[in-house]
Amino acid sequence: MVNDDACELLCLDLPHAERIRAAVPGVDDVEPSAGHARAMGDPTRLRIAVALLVGDELCVCDMAWVVGASQALVSHHLRQLRTAGLVASRKDGRMVMYRLTDRGRLLASVLLDVEDPRLVGEADRV
């Protein structure tokens, strides 16, 4: 079986490879970003993020109707997004309102390749 994904001979440009290796962050340094990506990696959570991207701030009832899922399921996914730091919540009387954090808004926009006017220039600051 031919493996087209690997070199057929061992060759290493050591100076070049070492410069790159020195610039690549360690696993501990990239783990938070990997966690953010995992949090948005579920289709339901990504749809919730889109609803918040479009609607700015929504309660669980509205969000459940918008994404076509139960309130319990939406609440579960919102907890995961909040734990990852991508969603923030606030109590408004007896309702809890959710919104994307700046990081959540940026990540959702990048994943969906949509331009949010509030993010213009944001990528340069991250």
Image (cartoon, rainbow, N blue to C red):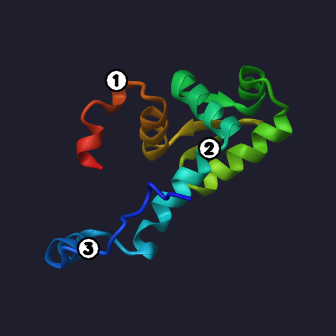
Residue at left offset 39%, top offset 25%: 116
Q: Is residue 36 left or right of residue 7?
A: right
Which circle's residue, 3 or 2, is located before the other in the chain? 3
Q: Secondary structure at mark 2?
A: strand
> How far is the residue under mark 3 from the one under mark 1?
47 Å
Are dots 3 and 1 in contact, CB under 8 Å? no
How packed mark 3 is, by other alpha carbons closer than 10 Å (few <14, some 14-19, many 20 or more), is few
Which circle's residue, 2 or 1, is located before the other in the chain? 2
How packed mark 2 is, by other alpha carbons closer than 10 Å (few <14, some 14-19, many 20 or more), is some
Q: Which residue is mark 1?
A: 117
Residue 82 % position (x, y): 62, 51
Label ID, residue 11: 3
Q: Is residue 115 left or right of residue 107?
A: left
Up/down of 63 relative to 32, above or below: above
Q: Quadrant of residue 40?
A: top right
Q: Quadrant of residue 121?
A: top left
The amino acid type of the residue labelled 1 equals: Pro
Residue 43 % position (x, y): 67, 36
Which circle's residue, 3 or 1, is located before the other in the chain? 3
Are dots 3 and 2 in contact, CB under 8 Å? no
Residue at left offset 59%, top offset 53%: 38
Q: Quadrant of residue 110?
A: top left
Up/down of 112 relative to 3, above or below: above
> How far is the residue under mark 2 from the one under mark 1?
22 Å
Q: Which residue is mark 2?
A: 89
Residue closer to the observer: 60 or 39: 39
Residue at left offset 38%, top offset 75%: 26
The amino acid type of the residue labelled 3 equals: Cys
> How far is the residue under mark 3 from the one under mark 2?
53 Å
The amino acid type of the residue labelled 2 equals: Ser
